[in-house]
Amino acid sequence: MSGVPPVAPIAGPRPLVVRVRSILVDPRSEWAVIDAEPATVGSIYRYVFVLAAIPAICRALRWSLPGYFNVSASLALQLAITSYVGALIAVYALALIIDALAPTFGGQKGQIPALKIAAYSATAAWVSGIFLLIPLVGILALVGALYSLYLLYLGLPVLMKAPPDRSVAYTVVTVIAAIVVFMVIGAIVGRVSGIGAGFSGYGGY
């Protein structure tokens, strides 16, 4: 249904660097690989643990730069932790949304496929978080976040088996629902941390 040739199952997930490069450069083919790839919550989150740290750390460093917000080291660390924890929760929350909405758009429910989409579609947003270190090119981080939406759009019909002609609607509704959920998560995580809502979405923007 996705227009991508079926891919034979492989023994395990790709190495992290290979997965990042492939999902960014050739996402259509990579989603087919991801669909055929055996996975568990643990194996998917090993990827998330590493990638989600990029914007969290860079965001905290940006806030502590002289001449910027220049917050204390302890507050910058709190910001990083809050952003990181929020991102980990957001991935799982997004997966729940994707899974719950699948039947509405002609797709098939599946917790692991939904978690794959939530995790791997965020790759561009996380990797582009490196640009948060430089205020003048920080807009590139937003470009990365937008590319992640495109990755989400490409992944939904492949992993959730939704008709391609309903992918736009599926993506839009998923994003709207996710924004609401992320705002709630951000408020809760920020309140628990005592520094306000220091998180939005995947933890970097």
Image (tube, rainbow, N blue to C red):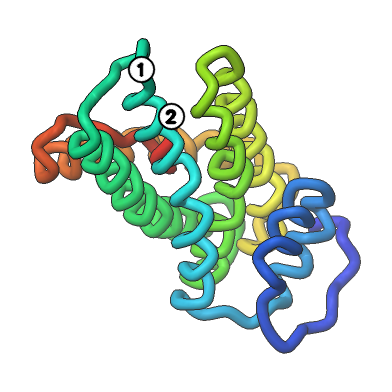
Say which residue label 2 marks: 205
Q: Amino acid at mark 1?
A: Pro
From this viewpoint, is residue 181 visible? no
Q: Helix, strand, or loop for circle 2?
A: loop
Q: Helix, strand, or loop for circle 1?
A: loop
Q: Residue 18: horizontal and vertical position, in percent? A: 75, 63
Q: Residue at x 86, y 72 (%)?
A: 6
Q: Quadrant of residue 68?
A: top left
| Quadrant where the image shows the N terminus | bottom right
Relative side of 109 to 165, left or right? left
Say which residue label 1 marks: 66
Q: Residue 117: horizontal and vertical position, in percent? A: 58, 57
Mark 1 or mark 2: which is in front?
Answer: 1
Q: Nearer the viewer, residue 167 or 184?
A: 184
Q: Residue at x 77, y 69 (%)?
A: 33
Q: Amino acid at mark 2?
A: Tyr
Relative side of 193 to 8, left or right? left
Q: Which mark is residue 78?
A: none
Instruction: Please determine whether, in this image, residue 58 is positioned above or below residue 28.
Output: above
